[in-house]
Image: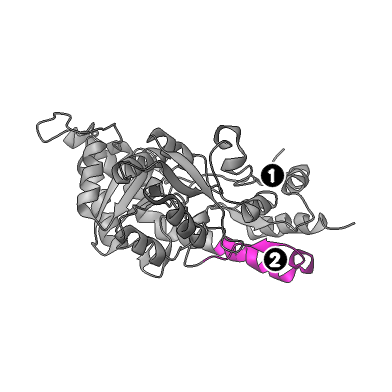
Amino acid sequence: MIKIPFLRPNLVRQDTFTHYLSQIEKSRWYSNYGPLNTLFENRVLTEYYEGNGAALTVNNATIGLMLAINQSKRPKGQYALMPSFTFSATPLAAMWCGLEPYFVDVNKDDWCMNEELVEDLLKKLGDKVAVVVPYATFGTDVNLTFYKELHKTGVPVVFDAAPSFGTKGRSGSFGNDFPGLIVFSFHATKSFGIGEGGLVYSADRELISQIRQAGNFGFSTNRETISQGLNSKLSEYSAAIALATLDAFPEKNQIRQQIYQWYLEEFQKNPKLNKGWQLQKTEGEIAYQFMPVLCPEDQSNIDFVKLLADNHIEGRTYFSPTCHQQKIFSSFERTLMANTNNISGRILSLPLWEGIEKSDIAQVTKILAKGLEP
């Protein structure tokens, strides 16, 4: 029996969004960018982005990526440059847009896409690059300078920032004033979880307006489909939960940051966990979804998942296998994957959720340290 699960989603309680639900009953407006949805978008823009740009809700982040990539891609392009160390939704979204993922190795320290390799590929492939899709690995505050300059040159950038809503760093909230597109996930397992949902942000208001139209069947103002579209709209019921989550999120974020600090303390004070274990080099204040670590080079993450399970603790391996190691993506082109392959064999994702106790963290790390004993 699992005593410490990997994740235990903790969405807001019913009594925190009942007053929002009552507004739905009064307005009888249930979808189609209703008043609660509009209120949520405006609050996000004001409270997180200083009123810069525009934000658009979507019914899930994968749809958000599809819309963002399809709206941004260069018409003669073939490839979407992206890391392989990401969730399958990233390459799948590119494929739905008629593009081929081109996998790029990551840095060995922050586990984000290697920008020098991106530059090399842009020189090599030229106009064949339709879009660049970096991943903000596990919510870290990626330095956007390179990607801002890239976007200005005419190479569109769509950031997969699925776990990053609430991350604060160099420019305030992650993506603030970014001219390309930033896509966040509100899935139940994310730190800002509402069940299913997502958000697309950009400093370019016209770009968000185009995506909003595409997400509503490509309708014009007279409800004639004038461009390629689909249905990405968030229901008012989900918007009600999102508003209540927005009310509670600062406290939720603090709790998750405290749990992460407990992990750091345990790793720092246990000499056995200082030998060969590696933490991600992160930037900014992160709304942590789980605790990612790399086990020693001569160990296997699968062995540690089994060791934890034998002690009634649930661990995972985000992302192993990586995308290029999965059959459906294995035929796509890629750079040399030395860092990605190394990380995928060592990555271990440890429990982190609101309600987990400090003693639980101590137990998890104690078991990991025990695993190093001869």
The image quadrant of residue 63 is top left
> Any magenta on residue 277?
yes
Disc 1 versus disc 2: distance between alpha carbons? 21 Å
Q: Position of residue 287 (x, y in %)?
A: 48, 58
Tell me how the rendering is colored: one colour
Towards the viewer: 211 or 162: 211
Mark 1 / mark 2, whichever is N-terminal = 1
> Where does label 1 land, which residue?
3
Q: Residue at x 50, y 62 (%)?
A: 116
Q: Are marks 1 and 2 in contact (CB under 8 Å)?
A: no
Looking at the rendered structure, the kind of residue marked 2 is Phe
Per the rendered image, the range of residues in magenta is: 258-282
Q: Residue furthest left?
A: 222
Q: Position of residue 202 (x, y in %)?
A: 29, 55
Q: Residue at x 9, y 31 (%)?
A: 222
In this rendering, the answer to whether 44 lies above or below 87 is below
Towards the viewer: 254 or 143: 143
- Say few, some or many: other residues with alpha carbon within 10 Å of mark 2 (under 14 / 14 to 19 / 20 or more): many
Towards the viewer: 296 or 100: 100
Towards the viewer: 277 or 47: 277
> Any magenta on residue 74?
no
- Say few, some or many: other residues with alpha carbon within 10 Å of mark 1 (under 14 / 14 to 19 / 20 or more): few
> Where does label 2 land, which residue?
267
Looking at the rendered structure, the kind of residue marked 1 is Lys
The quadrant in which the C terminus is found is: bottom right
Q: Secondary structure at mark 1?
A: loop
Select label 1 or label 2 by which is in front: 2
Residue 91 shows in the view: yes
